[in-house]
Image (spheres, rainbow, N blue to C red):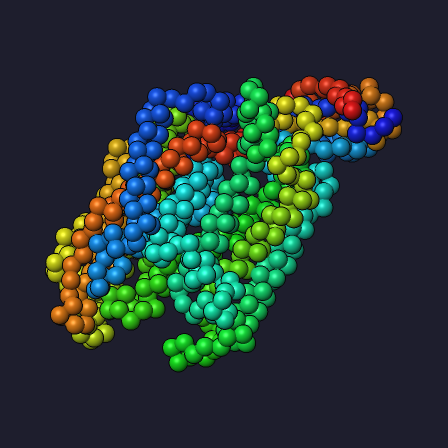
Amino acid sequence: MESGKNFILGIFDDEDVLLSAVKRVRANGVSIHEVYTPYPIHGLEDALGYKKSRLPVAAFMFGLLGTSLALLMQYFMLGIDWPMIIGGKDHTPLPTFIPVTFELTVLLSALGMVGVFLVKSDLKPYGKAKIFDLRSTDDKHVMAIDLAKNKFSTEQIQDIIRESGASEVNPKNFDN
Amino acid sequence: MQVTSPVREPLVTGGKTYKDVTDDICRQVEGPPTKSWMLGMAAALGALAIGGYALGMTVWNGIGMWGLNKTVGWAWDITNFVWWVGIGHAGTLISAVLLLFRQKWRTSINRAAEAMTIFAVMCAALFPVVHMGRPWLGFYWALPLPNTFGSLWVNFNSPLLWDVFAISTYFTVSLVFWYIGLIPDFATIRNRAQGKISKVVYGALSFGWDGAAKTWMRYETVSLILAGLATPLVLSVHTIVSFDFATSVIPGWHTTIFPPYFVAGAIFSGFAMVLTLMLVTRHVYRLKDYITITHIELMNIVILVTGSIVGIAYITEFFMAWYSGVDAEQYAFLNRMTGPYWWAYWSMMTCNVISPQLFWFKKIRTSLVATFILSIVVNIGMWFERFVIIVTSLHRDYLPSSWAMFSPTLYDMGVYLFTFGLFFTLFLLFAKFFPVINMAEVKSVLKSSTTKKPSIK
């Protein structure tokens, strides 16, 4: 069987039921493709065994880049390229460079991190969502299990999901 | 679905289910525009048209159309700029600072407050741009671009330049923060959309969001870090705006208290504007279960606290003027209180210092009518504050022979009207086509105040 085509969906009404179900399903040795929820659920990423996001590192690196670029730009422009005496002060007084440096740090850090987030999560204006169940952006939590990635039979998986508290268990096939 | 805790008041009342939240918010987006929306839009477009004429005349003929003179070189333009930037502080404060402090009541108001922030900053930015006189050359004056003068770079020692960086960074980061929050809600609307156009439009706006647990995890990380970045940012913006004045040598401007005092004033006026807008939105869209009296009361408490900080700052300025022993400084403040602009000063004192003190009474801070009136009073007061600081400090300078008064022309008023038209046009478009309340985040707090463990069937 080809992966990414035939799924079993467990539909859950309640986030706490979902959390315990995710743990139970995984404890039974079933691998979960992904869980789709209408709002962020704390602890779900741990229950699914996801590693912590490294986006904070991206934010820090982009911030560092912003700081360096801002300082380099100001030192180059007012210190090297066209030194001017303004108010009898140094050509390159560091304290007055701090506001612009701070703003550019924040700007690059924010834009860089969000850029990485959009790319990593494959979010783009012409992006098309793979929709398992339309209600997953409304009021239901949808647990998708890829049949091809599990050694269990369809019936076995259905039973495991149903026992763990799903309100509905549906098959879902993508034919493309 | 919603379990009400006996200990803590729920953030959303009316026993809403997740489905109710989706329906209540999406209904405004999906239905045809209401009559009151049409009327509001007509008024906003009218203001935009009349103001647009004044703005066009100002750009065409130059800022001689305004009432500025040799002595008072800054007046309504900068007053309006600071006023709008100040209003633009509440949105990011609500979404960033309250997120860091885990104040979950922000979820009902953050979306609209952030929208207000973005539109207010756009209105604010208009004034310095127009004041340049020849805005089409403004890029070379305001941004470090190579030019044919050498390159003669911009002056990084100038607070006015810091302002360019601060405001544009603030605008960009606020916009990004707002948009990231909108993506999941756009996906909700996309998945409900019936019409062909709305399917395509909300499909594009939602960026292909599917609500996967992994994406939500990243989304939460991004929100938290953006909040961490936006918190010092929001403080820096009005600090830098205050530097425009504080780093000068004009008596009345040259004070070290300005940064904290401006930031407090900005939050003060921003929350007032959020209340003005939200009370109307709440009424028209029937959102009383989402924006509850508790929300309004909490916002009124913020107004009370920041209003008192502003009041103390006013008094401190007077104390410092006396304590400094500098004649020019003392005169500037005496003139402010008792000079020809005494009426502006006392309007400011009444609106900003006395009126918010009424919020000590629980009856007043939980009354919708009183809150609505006071929120407008506060914004009138904050406009006068900037006018008082700017004009009264300038109009009697060191040479009595050059003392002057400022009176606005119709074009001063017209450009101000234009920004109102712009602001309300954008806000009404937002209120019609975007979800006014962050559905995903409201859903995430629906259960949070429960003490009971839901039973697993």
Q: Depth check: give the residue in front, B29 or B287.
A: B29
Q: Quadrant of the N terminus of chain B?
A: top right
Q: In which quarter of the image is residue B184?
A: top right
Inspect this view and state whether residue A136 appears: yes
The residue lying at 76 percent from left, 32 percent from top is A32
The residue lying at 41 percent from left, 43 percent from top is B119
Measured from the top left, where is residue A140 in percent x and y?
Answer: 62, 25
Q: In which quarter of the image is the C terminus of chain B?
A: top right
Q: Depth check: give the residue in front, B278 or B165.
A: B165
The residue lying at 48 percent from left, 31 percent from top is B434
Against A40, residue A159 (above or below) is above
Against B130, residue B8 (above or below) is above
Q: Could you tell whether A121 is left or right of B62 in the image? A: right
Inspect this view and state whether residue B166 appears: no
Q: Quadrant of residue A147?
A: top right
Q: Could you tell whether A165 is left or right of B188 in the image? A: right
Q: Quadrant of residue A128?
A: top right
Measured from the top left, where is residue B413 in percent x and y?
Answer: 24, 45
Measured from the top left, where is residue A98 in percent x and y?
Answer: 48, 67
Measured from the top left, where is residue B179 in percent x and y?
Answer: 53, 40
Q: How many marks?
A: 0
Q: Depth check: give the residue in front, B390 or B314.
A: B390
